Amino acid sequence: MEKKVVKVGLLGFGTVGTGVVRIVQGHQEDLQKQTGLGIEVHKILVKDKEKSRSITGMQELITENVEDVINDPEVDVIVEVIGGIHPTKEYILAALEQGKHVVTANKDLMALHGAEILQKAQEKGCDVFYEASVAGGIPILRALVEGFSSDRITKMMGIVNGTTNYILTKMSQEGADYAEVLKEAQALGYAESDPTADVEGFDAARKMAILATLGFRLPLNLDEVDVKGISSVSKEDIAYGKKLGYTIKLLGMARHDNDEVEVSVQPTMVPKDHPLASVNGVFNAVYVHGEAVGETMFYGPGAGELPTATAVVSDLVTVVKNMKLGVNGRGMVAPYKEKKLKGNDKKLSKYFLRLIVADKRGVLAQITQLLAEKNISLDQVLQQPYNGGSQAEIIMVTHTAAKADMDDCILYLKDMDVINEVKSFYRVEGGEA
Ligand code: NAP
Ligand code: HSE
């Protein structure tokens, strides 16, 4: 008998899992019109069955035993919204082994073990989709894989972590305190259960590894992403950035030029008139530059119950459409380009530097002489009295320089007698060759 309803085994019933149930139930008629089949949540795995849930009437579907879900012969698709690496990796591989399709929102898992999971899916003729893993409600993975399939992408920049963007926005617009705003972001369900991953940039790094792999069509590893988080960004850095025409963002940057690739996540001074500078709060944005298309930008909510669930359920719709056509597992293209990592001598950027120095004659000259010896020239300089005037604070923005020269220069600056402290040091977007 022909199937009338596709049955979903939901692993996780937290923020995203709840959103998935709401959308599957609330949009049933639309989903049916688009796929020709009903979609039903058939079983739900949780950690604690006794926990009270914001959606009632599902108790009979809920279990604490994963085998009740993945071994259920009626379940066609597993939707994994638990998070983390273990035991989710084992659950997904076990589900694929049984020929069940998988939709996941798990960037940690896909950034680290995506290749293995996709390989298993291909062997078993199953779909694995993970649109919600990057930039929540923005359909950016589909855009990279399908929308830009005819182009060569050379650069991607992303504000891909809602929590840190929310924190930096509040610090910048309201002068709010870092710790207080982090608590708010956690209460609103944006932050990961351990917010270290958000504030130290690891969450964004995982997303950038996924974007670079799909966008550049080469197998980028997570440990090849340079990462720096926002926990040391101060109100002063934000204020001086503003004075010089910049907004600080935790920016993921991926470039593929002259057949070499570089990917980083770091707090970056973005010029105020750049479209990424006005991406505020929990919103995410991904800027994509393609050789043929030129500049494009995708903007939307990067986290939260319903935005993330729309991406999950859209993946579900694709699985169901593929089931109807009998083409599951056939659409995947494994990364096929050779990966050559760019050396620090070829990573070009402008830099922002804030130094505390002795307020003495000739100090600025010594600093500029060192910069010149390292092939670095200055674009902007600002000097302010510091600590009641006994010291001075020098804020500089350089012209484009190589990362190798800049790193070297920082080491020398830290050693100079006239420099009391290198307070901060950020990449500045724009100006590179
Ligand atoms: P969450 O609210 O913490 O929910 C996790 C769910 O998984 C809970 O229902 C929990 O059960 C269940 N669970 C945890 N460990 C389990 C285990 N060992 N066995 C069985 N069930 C277990 O997480 P979330 O925010 O929905 O995030 C889910 C996934 O989506 C993560 O990969 C996350 O990175 C990703 N994501 C989240 C967002 C967002 O805005 N939240 C956005 C994009 C992607 P109990 O309910 O019983 O505790
Ligand atoms: N903690 C993540 C963020 C959730 O803040 O962006 C979405 O992946």
Image (cartoon, helix red, strand yellow):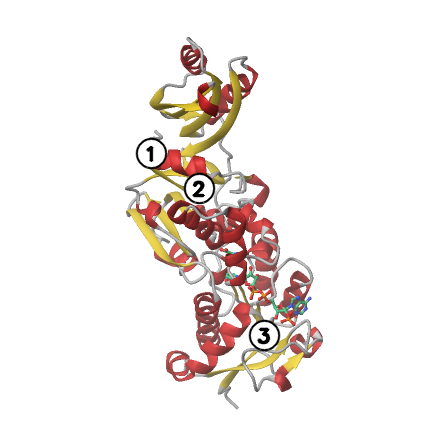
- The C terminus, quarter of image: top left
Residue sticking out furthest to the front? 388
Q: Which mark is on residue 10?
A: 3
Q: Nearer the viewer, residue 170 or 425?
A: 170
Q: Residues within 10 Å of mark 3 (few under 14, many from 20)?
A: many
Tell me the amino acid under the disc marked 1.
Answer: Lys
Residue 387 in picture, x, y percent from top left:
48, 24
Measured Cα–Cα span from mark 1 to mark 3: 49 Å
Q: Is residue 336 left or right of residue 75?
A: left
Q: Mark 2–mark 3 contact, CB under 8 Å?
A: no
Q: Residue at x 43, y 83 (%)?
A: 28
Residue sticking out furthest to the top? 362
Residue 81 in picture, x, y percent from top left:
57, 67
Q: Is residue 24 above or below residue 229?
A: below
Give the mark nearer the N terminus: 1 vs 2: 1
Residue marked by disc 1? 243
Residue marked by disc 2? 254
